[in-house]
Image (tube, rainbow, N blue to C red):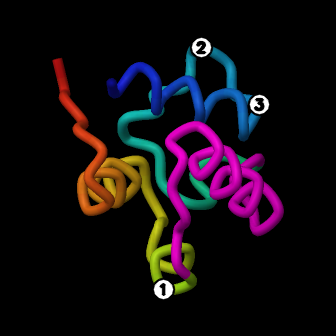
Amino acid sequence: MTQRLEDVFKTALRLTDEVDVSSLEYRGVPQWDSLGHMTLIAAIEDEYGITIDTDDVIDLNSYAKAVALLEKNGVPVTTT
């Protein structure tokens, strides 16, 4: 499951395979600016069929928080 989320991050933010997505934070790469953030939010919503509320959009500032957000929305996320 985490590979799926990593792929969403890589595609939405146009990251190379060399980027360690698991430790990524907002503005940690040039692509994750405000526009990239909204692109990422839309990609997560599309991929997982969820709607992210405004508070969570603002709070989602790392890969780890994206994992927590999915779990909060009932999407099982594993680290193996």
Q: How many marks?
A: 3
* SS at badge 1: helix
Q: CA distance from mark 2 to mark 3?
A: 10 Å
First reached walking from the N terminus: tag 1 or tag 3:
3
Q: Nearer the viewer, mark 1 or mark 3?
A: 1
Q: Main secondary structure of the magenta part?
A: helix
Query: Whole-percent x and y of residue 69?
Result: 35, 60
Is residue 71 found left or right of 3 in the rendered image? left
Earlier-in-chain disc, 1 versus 2: 2
Residue at mark 1 to residue at mark 3: CA–CA distance: 25 Å
Q: Amino acid at mark 3?
A: Arg
For disc 1, the marked residue is 55
Q: Residues within 10 Å of mark 2 (few under 14, many from 20)?
A: few
Q: Amino acid at mark 2?
A: Asp
Q: Tell me if residue 44 is in the magenta stretch.
A: yes
- Which quadrant does the N terminus fall into? top left
Q: Is residue 22 above or below residue 4?
A: below
Q: Amino acid at mark 1?
A: Asp
Task: Decide: is 27 above or below 77.
Answer: below
What residue appears at the point 76 percent right and 47 percent down from the top-left corner?
31
Magenta region: 31-53
Q: Secondary structure at mark 3?
A: loop
**Residue 22 picture location, percent across and down:** 37, 35
- Residue behind mark 2: 17
Is residue 69 left or right of 34 when viewed as pictured? Answer: left
Q: Position of residue 16 (x, y in %)?
A: 68, 19
Q: Nearer the viewer, residue 30 or 48?
A: 48
Residue sitting at x 24%, y 36%: 77
Residue at the disc numbered 3: 14
